[in-house]
Each structure stands twice: as C-alpha cells, then as structure tokens.
Image (spheres, helix red, strand yellow):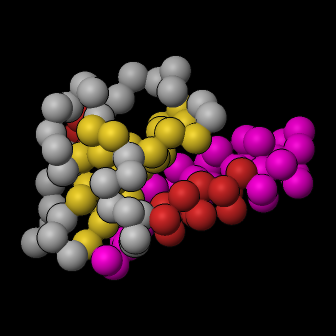
C-alpha cells in the first residue's frame, strides 16, 4: 500500500517536534522517527490502528503513540495520514473531513 502524508499531518508532526525540541532536541528527533516508523508499519498492516471512537467510520483509523493520535484514512490502495493530535485535544471533524480542492 502507498502511504501519503497530508500537508496538515506534516505540519502537525513538525509542530509537535518543535515543541518537544524546545526542552529536549534529541527526544524530539526520536519521537518524530518513532511516529514515522509506526506509519510505515501500515504498509504491511493497514488495520493496525483502531477505528476512531468519535467518528465510528471503519475507514478512519488511528495509531496511538504515548499522548499522540496519528489519524489516517484507509482506502483501497492508499493510506492517507490525515493529522496528528495530542490526546488532550478535542478532535475536530473539520480537520478530518476537509473538502478537496478541485
């Protein structure tokens, strides 16, 4: 399966890594690599993550890593990493179901 990172997911990865790096630069790099490694596992195990409880949609799933939620959409041949959330944040449906530009 092909994995695609949305612009939003990349921005969130960088945002959280920058926040962690403020106190612990080495930890931020390890965290970002761990997130990327988890996502890479989806190529072989696309249903590794659970369904997002708030959405109850089987194609929208999440991986949990510590305090973070990696939310992705499972399609026939593509996995789209949609966003990353801190577990204390309220998930915004607008971040998951953005209208596609034509």
Residue 90: quadrant of the picture: top left
User: In x, y percent, where is residue 66?
Assistant: 62, 34
Q: In the rendered view, would you say 12 is above or below 75? A: above
Residue 17 visible to the viewer: yes
On-image quarter of the N terminus: bottom left
Give the magenta part as a residue range: 1-30
Q: Residue placed at 45% from the left, 45% from the top?
A: 63
Residue 7 visible to the viewer: no
In the rendered view, does 68 fall on the left or right side of 91? right
- Front residue of 82/35: it is 35
On-image quarter of the C terminus: bottom left
- Front residue of 11/49: it is 49
Q: Residue placed at 27% from the left, 27% from the top?
A: 53
Magenta-colored stretch includes residue 28? yes
Q: Residue placed at 77% from the left, 42% from the top?
A: 20
In the rendered view, does 18 fall on the left or right side of 86? right
Q: In the rendered view, would you say 74 is above or below 3? A: above
User: In x, y percent, where is residue 68?
Assistant: 55, 37
In the rendered view, does 6 fall on the left or right side of 25? left
* Count of numbered circles on the image: 0
Residue 43: quadrant of the picture: bottom left
Determine the main secondary structure of the stretch shown in magenta: helix
Residue farthest left in this picture: 102
User: In x, y percent, where is residue 67?
Assistant: 60, 31
Magenta-colored stretch includes residue 37? no
- Front residue of 63/68: it is 63
Q: Residue placed at 24% from the left, 46% from the top?
A: 60
């Amino acid at each position: 399966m092909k994995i695609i990172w949305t612009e939003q997911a990349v921005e969130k990865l960088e945002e959280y890594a920058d926040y962690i790096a403020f106190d612990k630069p080495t930890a931020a790099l390890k965290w970002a690599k761990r997130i990327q490694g988890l996502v890479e596992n989806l190529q072989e195990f696309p249903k590794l993550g659970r369904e997002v409880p708030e959405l109850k949609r089987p194609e929208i799933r999440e991986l949990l890593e510590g305090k973070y939620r990696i939310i992705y959409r499972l399609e026939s041949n593509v996995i789209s990493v949609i966003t990353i959330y801190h577990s204390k944040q309220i998930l915004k449906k607008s971040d998951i179901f953005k209208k596609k530009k034509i």
